[in-house]
Image (cartoon, rainbow, N blue to C red):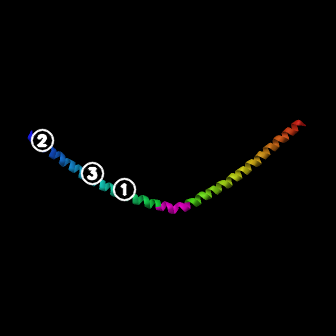
Amino acid sequence: MNFWLDFLPLIIYILLIIFLIIGIILGVKFIITLDKIEKVVKDVNDKVQTLNGFFHIIDYTTDKIALVTDKVVDGIASIFHKIRFNRKKKKIEKESE
C-alpha cells in the first residue's frame, strides 16, 4: 500500500508534465500557423485593393447602361401607351357618333 501512495503521485506528476509540454508545443505551432494565415490574408487583401478601381469602373458603367436602357424602355412604353389610348378614344368617338 505504501508503494502505491509513493508511486501514484509520481506517475500523475509525470503525466501532467508531458501534457504541459505537448500543450506548449501545440500552442507554438498554432501561433506559427496563425501568423502564416495572417500573411496570406494580408496579401489577398492587398491584391483585392488593387482591383478595387477596376470594380468601381465596372460598377459605374453598368449603372449608366442600366439608366440608358431604363430611359429607352420608358420611352417605348409611353409611345405604345399613347397609341393604345388614341385607338380607344377614336373607338369611343365613333361609337358616340
Q: Residue at x 87, y 39 (%)?
A: 93
Seen from the viewer's position, the closer of residues 87 and 45 is: 45
Residue stretch in magenta? 46-54
**Gap in angstroms between the C-alphas marked 2 and 3:** 28 Å
The type of residue carrying mark 1 is Leu
Considering every residue shown, the one lying at the far left of the view is 2
* Residue ID for mark 1: 34
Mark toward the start of the polypeptide (2 vs 3): 2
Within the magenta stretch, is there residue 69?
Answer: no
Up the image or down, 24 lies above or below 50; here it is above
**Is residue 57 shown left or right of residue 13?**
right
Q: In this picture, is 74 found above or below 2? A: below
Q: Which numbered tag is attached to residue 6?
A: none
Give the Cα distance between marks 1 and 2. 44 Å
Secondary-structure class at tag 3: helix
Instruction: Say the numbered circle drawn on residue 23.
Output: 3
Question: In the displayed image of the protein, which residue is found farthest to the right?
Answer: 97
Label ID, residue 5: 2
Say above or below: 93 vs 30. above
**In which quadrant of the rendered image does the C terminus lie?**
top right
Question: In the figure, is residue 3 to the left or right of 92?
Answer: left
Task: Give the mark, 1 or 2, whose residue is nearer the N terminus.
Answer: 2
Q: Where is residue 31 in the image (x, y as percent from the top left)?
A: 33, 56
